Every structure is written in C-alpha cells, then in structure tokens.
Image: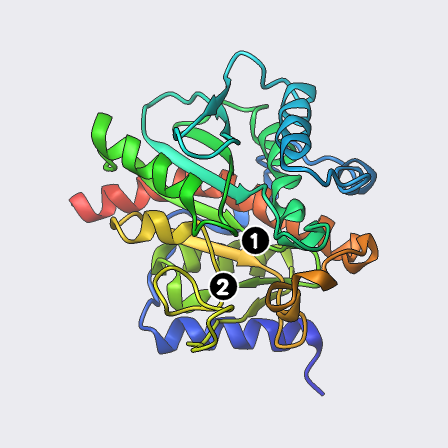
Amino acid sequence: MVSRLAAGWIAVLCCIALIGCARLRAVPIESFVADVPVALADADQINGGLADVPLSLSERAERLREMFRAVGCSNDLSDQYDGHSEYPNVICTMPGETSRIIIVGAQFDKPRYGSGIVDNWSGTAMLPALYAALKTRPRTHTYQFIGFTDATRKHRVGSRYFVRKLVEHKGLHFVRAMVNLKGVGLGDAAVWSNRADPDLLLDLSSVGEVMEATLRDVNFRRSEHPLLISHSREFPFIADAESFRRFGVPTITIHSFSADTIRLIRASRHDVDPQLIDPDAYYETYRLVAVYLGYLDQSIDARGAQAAN
C-alpha cells in the first residue's frame, strides 16, 4: 500500500510532469536544507498565534501589527490605505541587500459570518513567524510580509490596490515572486498547482521532498454558482495571488483545502471552531514555507543567472 506521504508526492510530481515544468533545480536543495537556513520556532510558539482569534477587522489588523512588533518588525511596519476601505493593508518589510522583492501575503479579513479562523486568520497569523524565521541571516532579496484587507468581501481590493501603487511608482519588475497563504492548517499543505508559476512550484516540491513533508496537489474548478465565484467569474477560490499573476508576477498559492473542507469557503458559517486547525499540520506547513522562502532567496537569482548565460 502506498503511504500517505508517498501518495502526496506522487500527486505533486505527476502534476509537474503534466504541466511541462520539469526544470532543473537552480540551487542544490539537499545541502541547503541540511544547513538549516532559517531559525525555526517551536510548535507551541507557532500554534500560539491562533489563540483568541480576533473577530472584528479592526482587531485583526491591530493584532497583526502587535505580532509583527513582537518579533522585531517595528521600524519597517506600515499601513497602506486605499482611500475606500476602512481597514489598511498591514505591511512588514525586511530589507535585503537589493531592492528585488519577494512578497508573502495573506488576507486578514473574514466573511460576514463565522470567525474566519481558517479563511484566513490561519494564513495571516503565520506571517510574523515567517518574518522571525528569516530575519536571522542576511538576504539578497527584500521580503515584504503583507496582511491584505478586503479580499473576501470586495474581491481582493487590498492586493489589487497594492499592485496598482507598485505599477504607478516603480513597476513590478522588482517583484520576483509572490507566495500566497490561504487557509493553511486544516491538514497537510496543498498547492494550487494549475495557477502556480512552474519554477516556484518546482522549488516548493523540491524543498518538501527533501524535508519529507507531505504536499498535496489540490486545484479549484470553474463554478457557475453566484456565491462561489471570484471577480473573474472563474474560480470558487479568491486568492490575492491573482492580483499579481494577472500582471505577470510569478505566484504560488499554498493552502490546505480538500474536496471536503472547501465548504469552509462555500459556507463561511462553518468557519467558527479553532479545533478545525490541526496543530501538527499547521506547524509542519510553517516549517515547509519558512525553509521554502529561504531557498527562494538563492534559487530565484541562480535561475536568472542560468537564463542570462
């Protein structure tokens, strides 16, 4: 019998082959992971971020600020208002050696009903922990960890405004990748592979394989139901990555949904119980994403150098 771990990797690797993205790894992954390139927190610290989930949007924004300050992001912490929403994008910037940017984002708002524990406090609460994991070593890229506002209720208003301001001021060529966290911790990590940049997908699968982490391939089909579709009228899954993807920025969305648990988006009244989150799965997703983000700092530049040659 094929184990759950093996089955997860078979699904992801088959997906990579099917979409024609079997590229060479730009940086040897085994030595990178063995070097422990990030400072990982323990499970109690990570799962503590899910305690006492704030229910109002103002409380969620303030809690996110407090969590960033607690891990040392104070001087580089800012709010970005779009002039229409009452609540801002909350942005923590970790300067690197260059102005090239890797964005890690999650929406902090929630549907009208429910507590929004899965969609998407679980993704938002992980952002400060990822900042803390990466800040201990110098990085080539500048990282921006962003809690986006109004993703659920107003069709990605926060991320769309962020992208528009980048286009107006300095363009998007500085943004080398956007990693979107959406509904993590329900179970093993999953990737929306048919909307992922092939290189970002290969790097994630490579890191997960070496870390022996389960990574599932779970995509989202078209839906004609008026309550399930995004602004594009195509997918029943609203992800801030789409705001960047439509401008050609490489993106990847990491989540934990399945055919059974997608109901937490389809019927937000169900998203009320903290016990929906599997603490072991949540912590393992944090470990995977933290190492993956550290790996991207090297692999993106190495791949660019290969292309130039």
> Label 1 amino acid?
Lys
Say if residue 170 shows up in the picture.
no
> Label 2 amino acid?
Phe
Q: Position of residue 240 (x, y in %)?
A: 44, 49
Kindly state the secondary structure of the residue where label 2 is placed.
loop
Q: Residue furthest bottom?
A: 1
Q: Position of residue 53 (x, y in %)?
A: 76, 41
Disc 1 packing (10 Å; few <14; some 14–19; many ≥20): many
Residue 20, placed above or below residue 138: below
Residue 237: mark in rendering:
2
Relative to 248, 157 lies left or right: right
Q: Name the image quarter holding the N terminus.
A: bottom right
State the residue in front, 128 or 223. Answer: 223
Q: Position of residue 243 (x, y in %)?
A: 35, 49
Labelled pair 2, 1 in contact (Cβ < 8 Å): yes
The residue positioned 58% from the left and 30% from the top of the image is 131
Residue 9, quarter of the rendered image: bottom right
Q: CA distance from mark 2 to mark 1?
A: 10 Å
| Badge count | 2
The residue positioned 38% from the left and 75% from the top of the image is 17
Disc 2 packing (10 Å; few <14; some 14–19; many ≥20): some
Residue 265, placed above or below residue 68: below
Say if residue 300 shows up in the picture.
yes
Residue 191: mark in rendering:
none
| Viewer-nearest of discs 2 and 1 | 2
The residue positioned 47% from the left and 58% from the top of the image is 238
Q: Position of residue 260 (x, y in %)?
A: 67, 76
Residue 194, placed above or below residue 7: above
Relative to 77, 82 lies left or right: left
